[in-house]
């Protein structure tokens, strides 16, 4: 959503803008291809992605198409694409092929493009790269995580690589706080990295098999949710388990740090809960 409209996509490959006051339809755009990600938008432009690698820029007020570009995609993917990261006049997008592209959000021209991750292996499964989480802005750098390639940091301005950590594999949103970043891996490992150089500060595997949510970095801990409705608080210094709480019978799929504590979302139920405490 932006200040003037709510933008959604439907199963018929259409983008629909609704008035936030009364939910009346403002405009509708038929993409013509299956949509692979939630729209990315600001006050001027809505950007939509399709399963065959197209990115389409729409005028946010009228729904008129203003640009389109197409990038190669992998033959096999493990999930939906991530919405792009909009920063000023640019949008940074990751593709299942391992490419990262920074484009002008107003006309679609490319600022820079990098082959962030290269697939390797004997079959399509082993060659999966998948950039499934939205890139994250951290100061002057943009962080991109992939299913098998790890995390790489690029300078937002020119795409120069600052560092990479090939061990920090993730399909979840990267958590950033001050000089650290945290990721949860595909096998439920939790890692804390130095934001300046990408060095691994610690890696913990004791929660494997729990189907972890994306992490949150709190004041003293890294917090993750599990498929069993539990919250784990890992010590920011060494990753040891500080505490564990059962907050639901359903999977914890999303965490958000707010002033009052942690906002927890439970999959399937549509339920939100606020957890407070010193963490």
Image: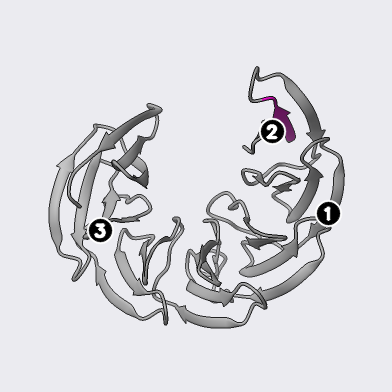
Relative height, residue 124 to residue 207 (above, below)? below
Q: How many marks on residues?
A: 3
User: For the point 73% across and 53% down, which residue is it?
Assistant: 52
Q: Which residue is mark 1?
A: 68
Q: Nearer the viewer, mark 2 or mark 1?
A: 2
Q: Earlier in the sequence, mark 2 or mark 3?
A: 2
CA–CA distance in space, label 2 to label 1: 23 Å
Q: Position of residue 165 (x, y in %)?
A: 43, 78
User: For the point 28% across and 56% down, which residue is it?
Assistant: 218
Mark 3 lies on a secondary structure that is: loop
Which quarter of the rendered picture does the N terminus lie within?
top right
Q: Which residue is mark 3?
A: 219
Mark 2 lies on a secondary structure that is: loop
Relative height, residue 89 to residue 258 (above, below)? below
Residue 170 shows which numbered tag?
none
- Give the residues drawn in magenta, as a range: 14-19
């Amino acid at each position: 959503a932006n200040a003037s409209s709510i933008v959604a996509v439907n199963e018929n490959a259409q983008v629909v803008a609704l008035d936030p006051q009364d939910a009346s339809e403002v405009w509708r755009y038929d993409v013509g291809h299956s949509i692979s990600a939630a729209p990315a938008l600001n006050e001027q432009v809505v950007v939509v992605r399709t399963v065959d690698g197209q990115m389409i820029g729409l005028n946010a007020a009228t729904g008129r198409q203003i640009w389109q570009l197409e990038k190669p995609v992998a033959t096999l993917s493990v999930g939906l694409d991530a919405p792009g990261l909009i920063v000023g006049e640019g949008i940074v997008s990751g593709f299942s092929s391992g490419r990262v592209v920074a484009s002008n959000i107003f006309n679609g021209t490319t600022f820079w493009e990098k082959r962030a991750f290269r697939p390797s292996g004997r079959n399509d499964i082993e060659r999966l790269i998948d950039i499934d989480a939205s890139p994250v802005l951290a100061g002057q750098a943009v962080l991109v995580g992939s299913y098998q390639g790890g995390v790489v940091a690029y300078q937002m301005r020119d795409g120069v690589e600052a560092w990479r950590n090939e061990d920090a594999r993730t399909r979840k949103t990267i958590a950033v706080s001050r000089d650290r970043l945290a990721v949860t891996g595909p096998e439920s490992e939790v890692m804390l990295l130095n934001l300046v150089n990408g060095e691994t500060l610690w890696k913990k595997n004791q929660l494997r098999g729990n189907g972890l949510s994306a992490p949150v970095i709190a004041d003293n801990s890294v917090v993750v949710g599990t498929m069993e409705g539990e919250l784990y608080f890992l010590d920011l210094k060494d990753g040891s388990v500080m505490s564990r709480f059962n907050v639901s019978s359903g999977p914890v799929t999303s965490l958000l740090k707010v002033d009052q504590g942690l906002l927890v979302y439970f999959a399937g139920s549509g339920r939100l809960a606020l957890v407070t405490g010193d963490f």
